[in-house]
Each structure stands twice: as C-alpha cells, then as structure tokens.
Amino acid sequence: MSGSFRIGRIFGVPLRLHWSVPVLLVVIGYGLGSGTLRAWVPDRSSTVYAACAALGTVLLAASLLLHEAAHAVVARRSGIDVEDVTLWALGGVTRMGRARQARVALTVAISGPVVSLVIGGAVLGAAVGLHPVAGWSLPAALLAWLGWANLLIGVFNLLPAVPLDGGRVLHAVIWLVTGDRDRSEMAADRGGQIVGALIVAAGWLLILRGAPGALWLAVIGLFITFTAGVERKRVAVNAALRGVRVGDAMSSPVTTASDWLTVERFLEGDAGQSGHAVLPLTDLNGSPTGVVALRDAAMVPADRRADIRLRDIAAPLSQCTVARPDDELNEVVQGIRTRLGLLILVMDGLRLVGIVTPRDLDHLFERRATGRTARGPAAPPRWR
C-alpha cells in the first residue's frame, strides 16, 4: 500500500504502518481523553486523562494488529503465502495468496473477527470485575472502552461486504455450498456494493440529523462500495483470462533500449521519441536487464543526462514480473507484486520474446469478445 513504511515483523511476517494510523490514533486518543473518560469517571486531572488515553490508543492499535496477525498466521499454516501486514486508518490489510479450498478460505477469513471478539469479551469481563474495586474506576472505564471497541470491530468486520472479513466469509460459504468460486466471489462483491451503499445512506442520514461525526461512517461506506466494485472487475478479468497463456496476449517483437546508453542519447534517439511509457533494457549480449520509465529519464537534470546511463535509473530485472510464453496468464497477473504494475516481460530462456501490458490485455479481451483467435496485424503497443 502506497504511503506505508516497514516497521518490523510479526510472527515472521513483514509489518508495515500507513501514515494515516498515527493521525487516527491522535484523533481517537483526544476523543477518549477529553470526552469519554471524563464523562464516565469525572474529577481526575488532565494529566491522568491524557495518560489513560495514550495507553488506550496503544492497546487499541495492538488489538488491531492481533486481528490482522490472526489472518496471517492461519493463512501461513494453511500453506498460503503471506506478503505483509499493513495497518492503516480503516483497520488493516493482510496481503496474501488465494486459498485453493473453500474451507481454508473460510478459516482464514473468520480468524480475525474471532480474535477481536475474544479480546473484546475478555477485556470487557476484566472491566466488569475491576469496577467494584475501590480506586480502580478509571482503569475499569478504560478497559470497558477497549472491550466495546474490539467487540464493535469484530461485529463490523462480519458484515457481509467485501473487503470486510464478513464478505470473505460469505464468499467462502457460497463457494463451499455451490463449488463455484467465481460465482461466489461475484455474489460477495455484489453484497459489498449493496452494504456499502446502505452504510453511505445511513451516514448521510445521520449527518442531516445533526451528527457530523457520521461523516466517517459515510467515508467507510464509500470505501467498501468502491473496493467491492474493483473486486468484481478483478473476478471478471480472472474468469476471462482462465486458460489463456502468456504467449496468447504478448506483443512481439518488442522495442528495447541498450542499458549502457546515456539518458541524453536515449531521449534524443528513436526509443526516447517512441511514445512508450516504459521500455525493456538489454545488455551488450541482447539479454534483458530491466526496464526504464520514460518519465524517470525525463526527470534527470539536463546537465547530468550525458553522464548517467539508463541502467542507473532503471528497475532491475529482479524487480520485474517475468514469465514464459506457456505460463498461465491468470496466475502471472495475480502474482504481480511490483511497483511497475501490469508489466510482464516474456522470456524464452535468456531471450526476451515479448511483453504484456494493459493495452495487450485490452486486445485480448476484444479478440475473445468477437470470437477471433488470431491477432492479425497489430499496431505497435502503447504503454500506459
């Protein structure tokens, strides 16, 4: 996720933090210290309220982290690759591979909400136990707030709306009953769009009735609606690409540039004027070494272009998505995890034989829609 940075590892999985999390925690902490705790337990000093609020926000962040860690741990134990866990303003995101069985998908999806509900119940029980003890009213109030917050997180995440965990649970249950993965995903995504729209409507209704804090609810609804729509498109693309080989979609021959060229010669030459947004690079032997973005080349200061070579500003081959002509295109596309986006270098051994871009996928969909199996004369690929 853009705007996030790595802060460590949790259970062996890289942990990332989005810049929005500290902002959200400050907002939550301010509301907790200046409003909730003062209303529940009055007549304490501002320092005490501030300290309890800070502790409460840290504990809430830790509980959110445990929620996402549950997904990651269960997924890894089920044989699913987990790339990282990212905390952000709307909770957390665990990037992982796809489950191959409905039961596994169900277990992974439900693990997070279960952890939140268990934490919420345990903490709330501790608050109830501490409340009658003299002098422990403020800690009891803090635990009660934390318990209810976790219960709310657990219940909210069980709403049948992708990308919430409840949407993943719905998908897994329908998949388990029908045996049709694509139909179950489409149903869950459609449910996400409906639930998201209802949340937006509820948020705006509350705002009109004088509750400005409901704006956050409307934002969450918009996010759910948008994400569910994106998921539906992804499922449709996966279905369209099933059974297609990389070689069926690639453009060939490919315009390339030599990695030893200076930026100046590159921009003045035919490759730099080709209109392509990205070009593969090759070494003196013609073997691919990476890709260079025209935008990166253009950003090099004019007085340094004669001294900097393309390989100095290029993304190396190790950061590119590489596939063979016979590879399943669907699996390659789903496995893309680079900042370059949908850009696939197609290689036969050490030789670059083609490339796949979004434009090539557009051509592929057009051919499949019209029932054509041959590309015919193709214009030079446009990069975007």
Image: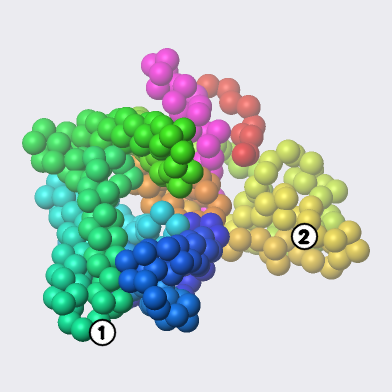
> Height in image: 25 above or below 220?
below
* Residue ID for mark 1: 135
Taking the spot 45% from the left edge, 21% from the top edge, the residue there is 367
Q: Would residue 134 appear left or right of 292 to someone viewing this image?
A: left
> Height in image: 288 above or below 234?
below
User: Residue furthest toward the right?
Assistant: 303
Depth check: give the residue in front, 134 or 121: 134
Taking the spot 61% from the left edge, 42% from the top edge, the residue there is 254
Q: The disc labelled 2 sits on which kind of residue?
A: Leu
Q: Please report whichever mark, 2 or 1, sits nearer to the chain's N-terminal start.
A: 1
Taking the spot 71% from the left edge, 67% from the top edge, the residue there is 312
Query: Which quadrant of the figure has residue 326?
Result: top left
Query: Could you say where residue 143 lies in the image, as x and y percent from the top left?
Result: 26, 72
* Residue ID for mark 2: 261
In the rendered structure, does residue 278 fall within the stretch colored magenta? no
Q: Would residue 58 appear left or right of 310 to someone viewing this image?
A: left
> Height in image: 242 above or below 259?
above
- How crowded pointer 1 is (Cα within 10 Å; few <14, some 14-19, many 20+) is rated as few
Q: The disc labelled 1 sits on which kind of residue?
A: Gly
Query: Which quadrant of the figure has residue 140?
Result: bottom left
Numbered label attached to residue 317: none
- How crowded pointer 2 is (Cα within 10 Å; few <14, some 14-19, many 20+) is rated as some
Secondary structure beneath dot 2 equals: loop
Q: What residue span does the magenta drawing correspond to? A: 349-375
The C terminus, quarter of image:
top right
